[in-house]
Image (spheres, rainbow, N blue to C red):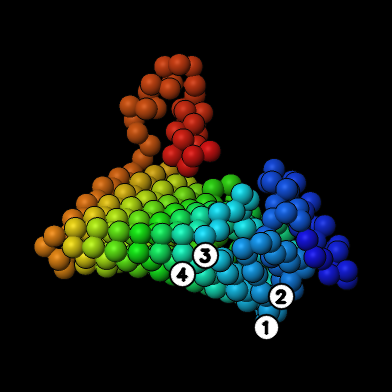
Amino acid sequence: MTIKIDLTREYEALVEAYQREGLDTSLFEGRIAAIIISGDKIIGLNNVPGVKIKGEEIENGVKAEVTIADNVELPFPVHLCTGYLKSEGYQRVVFDINVGKNSKVKFISHCIFPYAKNFAHEAVTRIKIGEGSSVLYDDEHVHGEGVRMIGKTEVDVGRGARYTGRFSLTKHRAKKLKLEMIARLDERAVLELESKVKAVKDDSVEIKEVAYLEGAHSRAKLRSTVIAFDRARASVINEAYGLGDYAKGHVECHEIVKGDADVQTVPLLRVKNDKAELTHEASIGRINEAQLIQLMAKGLTEDEAAELIIKGLLGE
């Protein structure tokens, strides 16, 4: 890992934040392709064979280009680390990711804002996946109490390619979150989008997932889970458009409300090809009564049983 000498302390502070959260600090090792961002500075950068990362410091943030060559299968993930160590401010990051043909790669993206009290973060990610490639993108967030986040991801999934995108904000406050993920699928492309968010106090959450099944035999699954406590508000929109011959899409959303939270979910399916097929299932409301009773019969209190069910829904 190439580290700018004058920013060594910031680099070490981010690694310490990872350790406190129990995250994998091996992601900072030299064998892993990575870009490490703190505020509007690139404090670490590492390339490996088959991966080229170029970064540019811009006003209030960083822009980076990530290129994966053809026929590359990486044994380790590509690490995209975005940090902000002050309590107030604004940060904008832009990622342009191009994956060549017949490659297999995993990205781990971490946003680390441990001290945020009045902080706004804007992230724009554009991903283009070449024919026959497979991409897994894990996006996990560690926030302080006062983060306003806007995230937009656009993905083009090439012929016979696969993209799995997972967003998780379950251990820290969402405060204000606006998340949009849009994907376009070519012939026989496969898409999986999954978002998991826990909202508490007066958090505000907006999630929108959209899949355009343009190619013949393309497939997509959109899944969202939101747990809203206290006075939190959440709006979830899942859209799927069946455009290609024999395209198949499925939308699945599960939202749980506890306290005075206010949650709405909108599944939107539109078919413009009589050979396409789209389906959806949705549930919204309180924790499943039968599951509560079953767990309480084993000796758990109602709160303990509810917490166990919620952890199961969030995959914790």
First in sequence: mark 4 vs mark 2: 2
Q: Which of the 4 image quadrants contains residue 47?
A: bottom right
Question: Which residue occupies 43% across, 22% down?
Answer: 295
Which residue is identified by label 3? 70
Outermost residue to the bottom: 59
First in sequence: mark 4 vs mark 1: 1
First in sequence: mark 2 vs mark 3: 2
Judge whether 37 appears above or below 17 on screen: below
Q: Mark 1 is on which residue type?
A: Glu
First in sequence: mark 4 vs mark 3: 3
Q: CA distance from mark 1 to mark 2?
A: 7 Å
Percent position of residue 130, x then y:
44, 66
Q: Looking at the rendered structure, which numbered label has been put on residue 59?
A: 1
In front: label 1 or label 3: 3
Assign a secondary structure to mark 4.
strand
Q: Residues within 10 Å of mark 4 (few under 14, many from 20)?
A: some
Q: Mark 3 is on which residue type?
A: Asp
In front: label 4 or label 2: 4
First in sequence: mark 1 vs mark 2: 2
- Lateral position of residue 294 relative to residue 65, left or right: left
Q: Mark 2 is on which residue type?
A: Asp
Q: Report if the CB atoms under discs 1 and 2 are less than 8 Å apart.
A: yes
Which residue is identified by label 2? 40
Q: CA distance from mark 2 to mark 3?
A: 31 Å
First in sequence: mark 1 vs mark 3: 1
Q: Residues within 10 Å of mark 1 (few under 14, many from 20)?
A: few
Q: CA distance from mark 4 to mark 2?
A: 25 Å
Which residue is identified by label 4? 128
Judge whether 300 appears above or below 110 on screen: above
Q: Mark 4 is on which residue type?
A: Lys
